[in-house]
Image: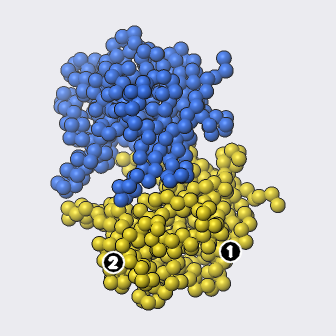
Chain colours: A yellow, B blue
């Protein structure tokens, strides 16, 4: 389907009067019954869900009782679903989750990386400190996994390994929502050291559609996870990032989660729809223009809301002098499958 | 030519057993007479030459007499052709160029950005200093442009503006080697603030082929520029970067220059060939695997040399824990145009 790939969804970077670079984007839009409602590129492309799996990975905290037993706040649950910026607020919430389970960040198995948040990064530099594991954008997910182990009575040591009961529990959840048998889910190691999940985009979109439908019917686990994400979008990513900005503007009408290498998933409870999107080359800079373009094509976002998100949909390209030298924008035409 | 685009040249990132992301690459291989000798994707793709223009931008320093008048070293000339890492050695050479023309880095018009070089970046952080204009990877090119203005008796103020005689002189050089009329060269603003040049890949490859042929016949300007680049490859990029590593291994058999947004050009004096390569999506991570794959396909690099460059051709993908979780590799089949 090279034609669809070329014309379906792409993000172009224009410098001066010339398109300098192009990102191809694959999109699958699926309803809760698994019907493909719209697509661009290859909706059956197999790739990794990456951090867009986090709402599914956080769900056992509610369903298995940790959320209630440890008196978690929605803010804390949101951080477990997040790829946070490592700001002081984010790391404080990660520490608070661990404290509630009588654990510390010493047990985190995610690797350290410099915080995305400028203030946090500068504060570390000025203090002459290296970034710690708690600054890893996945430290909320990891803290939640440690808490899940504690709640279930499992030794938390090695909680990141694929054979650990925490990871087996999470894998079962991924199978449940995607509708895939366990053996059809490809496993590899994510950036933070836990398993990540390979499957067709269509199955990722189905998982988000079914999750959205469960929210609509008030199933407690998914409803609590999505309430956490939409009431605390600042915990799901951070200031100046698309997940946070989009969920703020959407005010509960959708939940959204980014993943590394150009992944993005959206669930829309009201329409019982799921959207999975993958930038073919993995570029994060193409994600926001593509996501907002797809939501516009599907009439799932208003022109007013798009206006508020203009800088995400049409980001300026600045040079080292601070001059605007170009712009990114999405060109999208979704296709409807033949009946 | 969507078929060629799909099958001609791509760089794949594999995580676990699944290709997670893909980069399409366009390639044009041209001889000094302008014959297209091999290609992948669209050899007529119009994009920006970016910093791969630097050998052409540096040439007037030799041809207009600045190199001789100011007693420039080959090391200094190499930095004028470079996108350097901002190491202490690089910035010292930039300052030396300016001192020879009785100027200082206060006059540089490139914007500041943090050095690519880890030691230099840490030294600035530890001293609590912001990066300066001299750390910009293009500061050698800019220093050369200021020196050219001085040598030609032009006021160096505003040397970065397209209407300044320095930029007009450079534009004429770009037209000369690409064989394009001035009005066919697209102009926009580069990352460092001077003009960058849009044209088909085929013309970029022709420029490098003609430059290579001029080196072979001993024309002083091109021969001096290429001698500088190949004798001081550490000034053209920096430690751990492909231009430097490739030119060290090739020991004078080729000259190579990267450009932003996935550009790369190579000139091969012995074969009088030029190669221009563009990663469609602009990703720098795909450049080295693609360039080395193309050189291998063209039999322009030996298996021994490729062995030394293995980490560039097949870079490991590490996660935040330092674990190898994947690898990049190029899949290339160049096509020969129908006679």
Question: Badge 2 is on which residue?
Answer: A95
N-terminal of the two: label 1 or label 2? Answer: 2
Q: Quadrant of the N terminus of chain B?
A: top right
Give the tally of numbered discs: 2
Viewer-closest of A3 and B161: A3
Whether residue B30 is visible: yes
- Determine whether the residue tagged by mark 2 lies in a helix, strand or loop: helix
Q: In terms of image quadrants, where is residue B116?
A: top left
For residue A120, above or below residue A231: above
Residue B32 picture location, percent across and down: 50, 16
Q: In terms of image quadrants, where is residue A66?
A: bottom left
Q: Chain of mark 2?
A: A
Q: Quadrant of the C terminus of chain B?
A: top right
- Determine whether the residue tagged by mark 1 lies in a helix, strand or loop: loop
For residue A137, above or below residue A331: below
Depth check, mark 1 against mark 2: the one in front is 2
Residue lying at the far right in this picture: please name it.
A339
Say the numbered circle drawn on residue A272.
Answer: 1
Drawn side of residue A216 relative to residue A153, left or right = right
Residue lying at 82% horizontally and 61% vertically, measured from the top left: A339
Same chain, labels 1 and 2 = yes
Drawn side of residue B252 relative to residue A55, left or right = left
Residue lying at 52% horizontally and 60% vertically, measured from the top left: A187
Residue lying at 46% horizontally and 85% vertically, measured from the top left: A67
Whether residue A20 is visible: no
């Amino acid at each position: 389907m090279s034609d669809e790939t070329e014309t379906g969804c792409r993000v172009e970077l224009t410098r001066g009067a010339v398109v300098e670079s192009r990102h191809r984007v694959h999109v699958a839009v699926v309803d809760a019954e698994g019907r493909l409602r719209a697509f661009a590129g290859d909706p059956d492309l197999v790739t990794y869900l990456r951090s867009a799996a986090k709402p599914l990975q956080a769900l056992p905290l509610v369903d298995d009782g940790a959320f209630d037993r440890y008196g978690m706040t929605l803010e804390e649950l949101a951080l477990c679903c997040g790829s946070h910026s490592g700001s002081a607020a984010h790391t404080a919430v990660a520490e608070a989750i661990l404290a509630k389970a009588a654990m510390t960040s010493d047990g985190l198995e995610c690797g350290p990386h410099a915080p995305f948040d400028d203030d946090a990064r500068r504060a570390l530099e000025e203090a002459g400190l290296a970034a710690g594991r708690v600054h890893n954008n996945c430290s909320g997910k990891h803290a939640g996994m440690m808490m899940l182990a504690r709640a279930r009575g499992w030794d938390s040591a090695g909680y990141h390994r694929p054979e650990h009961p925490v990871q087996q529990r999470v894998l079962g959840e991924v199978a449940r929502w995607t509708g895939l048998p366990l053996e059809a889910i490809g496993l590899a190691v994510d950036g933070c050291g836990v398993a990540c999940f390979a499957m067709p985009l269509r199955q990722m979109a189905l998982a988000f559609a079914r999750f959205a439908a469960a929210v609509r019917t008030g199933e407690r686990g998914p409803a609590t996870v999505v309430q956490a994400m939409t009431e605390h979008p600042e915990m799901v990513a951070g200031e100046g990032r698309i997940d946070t900005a989009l969920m703020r503007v959407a005010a509960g009408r959708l939940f959204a989660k980014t993943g590394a290498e150009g992944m993005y998933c959206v669930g829309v409870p009201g329409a019982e729809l799921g959207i999975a999107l993958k930038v073919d080359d993995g570029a994060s800079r193409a994600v926001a223009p593509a996501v907002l373009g797809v939501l516009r094509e599907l009439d799932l976002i208003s022109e007013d809301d798009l206006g508020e998100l203009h800088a995400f949909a049409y980001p300026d390209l600045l040079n080292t002098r601070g001059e605007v030298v170009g712009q990114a924008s999405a060109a999208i035409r979704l296709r409807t499958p033949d009946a």
